[in-house]
Image (cartoon, rainbow, N blue to C red):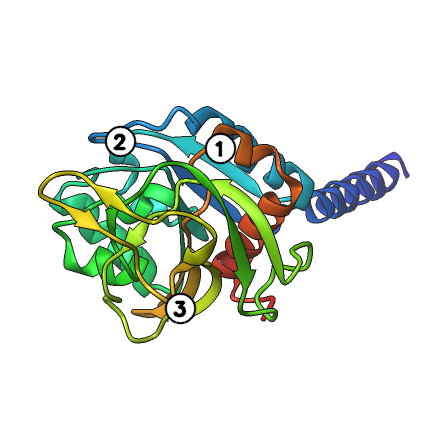
Amino acid sequence: MNLLKNTWRALILLFVVMLSNNVSAKQFNALLFTKTDGWHHSSVLEGVSAIKKIAQTHHFDVSWQEDAAQFNTDNLAKYDVVIFLLTTGDVLNAKQQQAFKAFIQQGKGFVGIHSAADTELEWSWYKELVGRTFVIHPAIQTAKVSVINKDFPGVEQMPSTFLWTDEYYQYSKPHSDKLNYILSVDEDTYSPDADWGEVKSDGMGDFHPMAWFQNYDGGRSFYSGLGHLPENYSQPMFLSHLYGGIYWAATGKGL
């Protein structure tokens, strides 16, 4: 009789543990990568704190790393999405690049924030993944930003147009013909002129994109050019925008 009671107790305990694990399981796992090889943004820590807050709010796991050795096949298998937050320069070696490429080809996701477009500029596959690359930027200014795709997740808190203060990157021509644009900035509302000596620009013209997404090489890619200033990462509207991109890149859902 005691053996039977103990067996039932063990089965009940196992059921409770399994139920608890199922209830507490996170939606997905994200690798947050902030390595820099060049300019280092003063807003990195605010950005990391913001992503951690988003993860807590929306019930997903995030691991913050600056060590490129994390980009190996076994380790990347743990994640659904990789977030390049304020990365710059050449941050991955050839072997790490191959592991990351295989990760995307397996149907996983990529999120690039701000200077992710100023990263791995010698790697054509990565430039296509991001969609456009950084060229130059003027001084930090306030400008009018427009939502041009109301269907992408995370723009629900954004009005059709809004004033935003940031460092507005000017980008190359698209490296991919699959880009779907989410946000644009109106160059008539600020001064886009920039002169860095050998590199000069008077802006991108009538259409100046600031955020976009695409399906690429079997996986998903989201990029937002906003997020230079530490103060940006305390704005709920911006955090909603970032989570929309993270959620879609990680799961393919939300459209």
Q: Which residue is drawn at 38% across and 67% down?
A: 206
Q: Residue 47 carries which label?
A: 1
**Location of residue 248 in the rendering, given as x and y in whole percent from the top left corner:** 53, 61
Amino acid type of the residue that numbered disc 2 sits on in the rendered structure: Thr
Q: What residue type is labelled 1?
A: Gly
Crowding near the residue tagged with mark 1, few <14, some 14–19, many ≥20 C-alpha atoms within 10 Å = many
Q: Which residue is painted at 41% across and 56% down in the image?
A: 187
Label 3's element? strand
Quadrant of the rendering where the C terminus is positioned: bottom right
19 vs 155: above or below: above
Q: Callout 3 environment at 10 Å: few (<14), some (14 to 19), or many (20+)?
A: many
Q: How crowded is mark 2: few (under 14 residues within 10 Å), some or many (20 or more)?
A: some
Marks 1 and 2: in contact by CB < 8 Å?
no
> Which residue reaches farthest right?
1
N-term-proximal mark, 1 vs 3: 1
99 or 163: nearer the viewer: 163
* Contact between labelled residues 2 and 3, with CB atoms less than 8 Å apart: no
Residue 214: mark in rendering: 3
Of marks 2 and 1, which one's residue comes earlier in the chain? 2
Q: Is residue 154 visible?
A: no
Q: Residue 149 versus residue 129: which sits nearer the camera?
A: 149
Quick check: 37 above or below 159? Answer: above
Dividing the picture into quarters, in which one does residue 50 lie?
top right
Residue 152 located left or right of residue 96:
right
Tell me, yes or no, whether the two marked residues, 1 and 3, touch with CB atoms within 8 Å: no
Q: Mark 2 points at which residue?
A: 36
- Give the spatial CA distance, label 1 vs label 3: 23 Å
Q: What residue is at 9 percent from the left and 43 percent from the top? A: 198
